[in-house]
Image: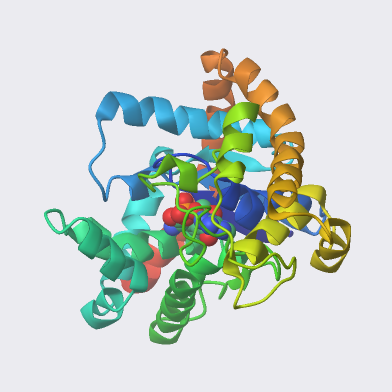
């Protein structure tokens, strides 16, 4: 394959949020139409096992996430779309990379520290190994570009370090990937606490918009969104709630933040929240109706996943064979 590779994924925990859509999926949608690249998008289901899952719910949720990828407009004719667990080379490359990853660097990851605090009774090896599995995802496909939100930047750095370390220790093998992070919308904040990112596992459902929320739920959540004490509509570090709402409006309408501020100028905060809610309803309503159709056809979804698995495996197999040879494992 001579096209450059773009790789990204979402782990099927909680809900696909408006943050995931604006920070990641909306960029994937743009990139899938760029002929210079082959895009590969996975459901990072092995990553989700680092927190406890109820197996039957987990299985349904993972398939639902896959349907949501399609409902958003990702095209399986243009992209390779598959489940991470269907390509066993991910786990195998993780082992090789584990053997060149230092405990110190893995334990310094912000997300590891945060998740350890959140689940003190389940600080498992997988939680610490999470970024190494993510590095394996990326490096298996010789990825050039990884479109993600800003919270994944640190994980991208470790993937780059591991690629360079392996290349130096053996010989040039992996492409060192670059992050692709939008200037606007790379960190959508919680509607209830605009100082924290909108998180798919937030227990306060008013804080998060799911891309499948009903119109009523979307409008209600924006109505309750936390703002500031004055009534100015502008972007600023001192105005995190309003900045977040303006950003959401701009991204939902596909306009610049400056134009969004102009359009929203002069509105009361209640009217601002209404306008932002409507922009999000307009964005998400078609996705929800496509999703409702797609999720009915489980066999159709699995057929797409199977085709994706075959395409992904054929690339992953070659990379892993090369890696096994370089580290000195006996080849048959
Ligand atoms: P995950 O599942 O937490 O998030 C998926 C994507 O959504 C972005 N994102 C956000 N962007 C803007 N605002 C937010 N509030 C917000 N919340 C999440 C994330 O940055 C991410 O791009 N480890 C990854 C999944 C993964 C992956 C990969 C990504 C597994 N393997 C390989 C890239 C390449 C994760 O947990 O993302």
The quarter holding residue 311 reads top right
From where the camera sits, is residue 318 visible? Answer: no
- The image quadrant where one finds the N terminus is bottom right
Give the residue furthest to the left: 121
| Between 234 and 156, the one nearer to me in the picture | 234
**Residue 17 versus residue 125 in the image, above or below:** above
Q: Residue at x 61, y 43 (%)?
A: 223
| Between 22 and 243, the one nearer to me in the picture | 243
Question: Residue 222, percent across and down?
Answer: 61, 44
Question: Residue 216, percent across and down?
Answer: 61, 28
**Residue 88 versus residue 323 in the image, above or below:** above
Question: Residue 76, percent across and down?
Answer: 68, 35
The quarter holding residue 178 reads bottom right
| Between 228 and 1, the one nearer to me in the picture | 228
Q: Residue at x 88, y 57 (%)?
A: 263
Give the residue furthest to the bottom: 168
- Tell me if 113 is positioned left or right of 41 in this view: left
How many numbered discs sit on the rendered protein?
Answer: 0
Q: Residue at x 45, y 74 (%)?
A: 154
**Residue 276 versus residue 183 in the image, above or below:** above
**Residue 110 versus residue 261 in the image, above or below:** below
- Tell me if 109 is positioned left or right of 291 in this view: left
| Between 138 and 184, the one nearer to me in the picture | 184
Q: Residue at x 30, y 66 (%)?
A: 114
From where the camera sits, is residue 221 visible? Answer: yes
């Amino acid at each position: 394959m001579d096209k450059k590779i773009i790789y990204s994924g979402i782990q099927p925990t909680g809900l696909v949020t408006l943050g995931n859509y604006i920070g990641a999926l909306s960029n994937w949608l743009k990139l899938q139409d760029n002929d210079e690249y082959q895009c590969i998008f996975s459901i990072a289901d092995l990553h989700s096992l680092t927190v406890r899952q109820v197996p039957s719910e987990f299985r349904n949720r993972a398939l639902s996430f896959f349907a949501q990828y399609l409902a958003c407009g990702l095209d399986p004719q243009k992209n390779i779309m598959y489940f991470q667990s269907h390509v066993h080379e991910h786990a195998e490359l993780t082992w090789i990379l584990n053997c060149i990853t230092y405990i110190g660097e893995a334990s310094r990851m912000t997300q590891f520290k945060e998740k350890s605090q959140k689940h003190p009774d389940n600080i498992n090896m997988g939680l610490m190994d999470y970024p190494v599995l993510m590095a394996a995802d990326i490096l298996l496909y010789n990825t050039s570009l990884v479109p993600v939100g800003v919270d994944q930047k640190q994980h991208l750095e470790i993937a780059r370090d591991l690629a360079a370390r392996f290349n130096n220790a053996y010989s040039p093998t992996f492409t060192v990937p670059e992050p692709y992070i939008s200037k606007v919308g790379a960190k959508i904040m919680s509607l209830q606490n605009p100082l924290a990112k909108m998180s798919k596992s937030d227990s306060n459902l008013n804080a998060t918009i799911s891309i499948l929320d009903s119109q009523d739920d979307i409008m209600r959540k924006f109505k309750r969104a936390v703002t500031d004490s004055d009534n100015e509509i502008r972007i600023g570090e001192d105005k995190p709630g309003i900045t977040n709402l303006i950003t959401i409006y701009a991204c939902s309408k596909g306009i610049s933040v400056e134009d969004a501020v102009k359009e929203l100028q002069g509105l009361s905060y209640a009217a601002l929240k209404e306008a932002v809610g409507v922009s999000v309803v307009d964005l998400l309503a078609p996705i929800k109706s496509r999703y409702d159709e797609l999720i009915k056809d489980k066999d159709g979804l699995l057929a797409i996943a199977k085709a994706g698995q075959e395409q992904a495996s054929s690339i992953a197999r070659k990379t892993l064979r090369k890696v096994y040879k370089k580290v000195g494992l006996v080849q048959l």
